[in-house]
Amino acid sequence: MQPLTGAQIRAMTVEERLQLIETVWDSLDPADVPLADEQRAELDRRLDDPNPGLLIPWEQVRAELDGG
């Protein structure tokens, strides 16, 4: 498979580019994503929080972004 060129990526629709980003992001192993110690500590704190506050399901956020 040939790598995509910048011109090919710019020729994609926004939706296609977002799908490409999602595909690449999903292909990464969490251990592959470098985090500073402060970032890791904040993520751990959030995961340990028994009351995360107001949460909005991704489906609702996506629907609002899509204009629905």
Image: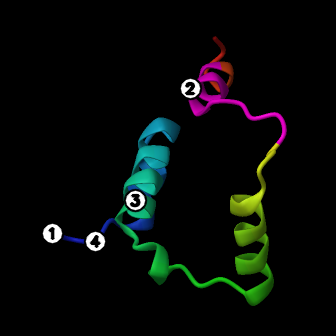
Q: CA distance from mark 3 to mark 2?
A: 18 Å
The amino acid at mark 3 is Asp
Number of marks in the rendered image: 4
Q: Residue at x 63, y 11 (%)?
A: 68
Give the magenta part as a residue range: 53-63
The amino acid at mark 4 is Pro
Name the quadrant containing residue 4: bottom left
Q: Which of label 2 and label 4 is nearer to you?
A: 2
User: How many residues crowd mark 3 within 10 Å: few (<14), some (14–19), many (20+)?
Assistant: few
Q: Residue at x 42, y 45 (%)?
A: 19
User: How many residues crowd mark 2 within 10 Å: few (<14), some (14–19), many (20+)?
Assistant: few
Where does label 1 land, which residue?
A: 1
Quick check: 27 above or below 32?
A: above
In percent of width and height, residue 66 lies at 61, 21
Q: Seen in the image, is 12 located left or right of residue 47?
A: left
Q: Which of label 3 and label 4 is nearer to you?
A: 3
**Pointers 1 and 4 in contact (C-beta within 8 Å):** yes
Where does label 4 land, which residue?
A: 3
Q: Which of label 1 and label 3 is nearer to you?
A: 3
Q: CA distance from mark 1 to mark 3?
A: 19 Å
Mark 2 / mark 4, whichever is N-terminal:
4
Where does label 2 land, which residue?
A: 59
The amino acid at mark 2 is Glu
